[in-house]
Image: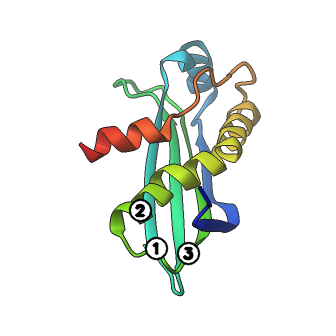
Amino acid sequence: MTKNYKIIAQFIKDMSSETPDVETYMHVKDNISKYQLGINIDSKAIKNQIIEVDTKISFLDKEENTKKSIFEFIYTSIVKVDEKIKERNILEKIVLVEVQNEIYPNIEKTLLNLLHNSGYPAIKIEKKIDFETLYKQNSN
């Protein structure tokens, strides 16, 4: 199967690491295993079959407590889609699965760098994100 799109650029649009004080840092260091990864993908057509795809990654504590850090970034991909592609479902799959699978190594590296540079060097990502499965779950 030939690829019907091309990523012409990718970059970090926005990045944030928020730890308000030392007490919060110490609390998070002991409890970071409770943090959960969140993904939100938005896209908008630019022109001439070019799509801006924003993949927002959040690593957050979902529990109610006052001592927590926030780690987020938006990774933007500029995608040129083959002009023959007109069907919405094919475009959706390109944006939500194919592009995400292609940029995933950069997303993982960016997240790990953000966490490590924020003072959490022991963090590792054990499980890869399966964008195909997420797509199928959200399509049903």
Mark 2 is on which residue type? Ile
Q: Which quarter of the rendered picture does the C terminus lie within?
A: top left
Mark 3 is on which residue type? Asp
* Number of numbered labels in the structure image: 3
Q: Which residue was labeled with disc 1?
A: 85
Q: Marks 3 and 1: in contact by CB < 8 Å?
A: yes
Give the numbered dot on residue 40: none
How far apart are the alpha carbons under marks 2 and 3? 11 Å
How far apart are the alpha carbons under marks 1 and 3? 6 Å
Answer left or right for 92 relative to 10: left
Give the numbered dot on residue 82: 3
Comparing 23 with 53, the one in front is 53
Quadrant in the picture for residue 120? top right
Comparing 103 with 42, the one in front is 103
Quadrant in the picture for residue 114? top right
**Residue at 49 percent of width and 59 percent of height:** 94
Q: Which residue was labeled with disc 2?
A: 90
Q: Marks 2 and 1: in contact by CB < 8 Å?
A: yes
The image shows residue 65 at horizontal and vertical percentages of 38, 24
Toward the front, the furthest residue is 1
Comparing 95 with 44, the one in front is 95
The image shows residue 22 at horizontal and vertical percentages of 64, 26
Mark 1 is on which residue type? Ile
How far apart are the alpha carbons under marks 1 and 2? 7 Å
Quadrant in the picture for residue 38? top left
